[in-house]
Image (spheres, rainbow, N blue to C red):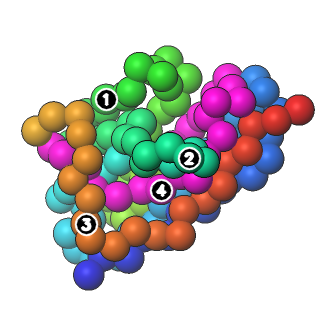
Amino acid sequence: QVQLVESGGTLVQPGGSLRLSCAGSGSIFSINAMGWYRQAPGKDRELVARISSGGSTAYADSVKGRFTISRDNAKNTVYLQMNSLKAEDTAVYYCNRASSVYFGPAPWGSWGQGTQVTVSS
């Protein structure tokens, strides 16, 4: 079973930047497409960024041009660099597997605890 641990979330002012990290365990981590998801209060969890095992990336329109996903397979770690943050980016951010065929979710059964990002002045 893959275990995922997200970190890096905090309170940041609008226009600021943050870098989130997700550490995964298990040898299957590196061969899967991975994604960053977020869930805002009262809303469904949504996929915002995806990276294939080979490094190809895709983004939701709401974050395109502001967020960058990357991965280090040697460290079983996925990153999300978030720039030009807006109040509407406030959410709990999670990482998990994503579909390698299209931009969509394909999570493993278990989720990490997530990391809270709050964008507010």
Residue 103 lies, in percent from the top left, at: 23, 34
How far apart are labels 2 and 3 at the CA level? 23 Å
Mark 1: few/some/many CA within 10 Å (<14, 14-19, 20+): some
Image x and y of residue 109, in percent = 27, 71
Reading the image, the residue beneath label 3 is 108
Q: Quadrant of residue 110?
A: bottom left
Residue span colored magenta:
80-100
Which residue appears at 78% of the width and 27% of the height? 14
| Residue at the spot of label 4 | 94
Query: Is 66 on the left-hand or right-hand side of 32?
Result: right
| Residue at disc 2, secondary structure | loop
Residue identified by numbered label 1: 58
Q: Which circle marks residue 102 in the picture?
A: none
**Residue extending furthest toward the right:** 121
- Looking at numbered disc 4 in the image, what kind of residue is underneath it? Tyr
Q: Earlier in the sequence, mark 3 or mark 1?
A: 1
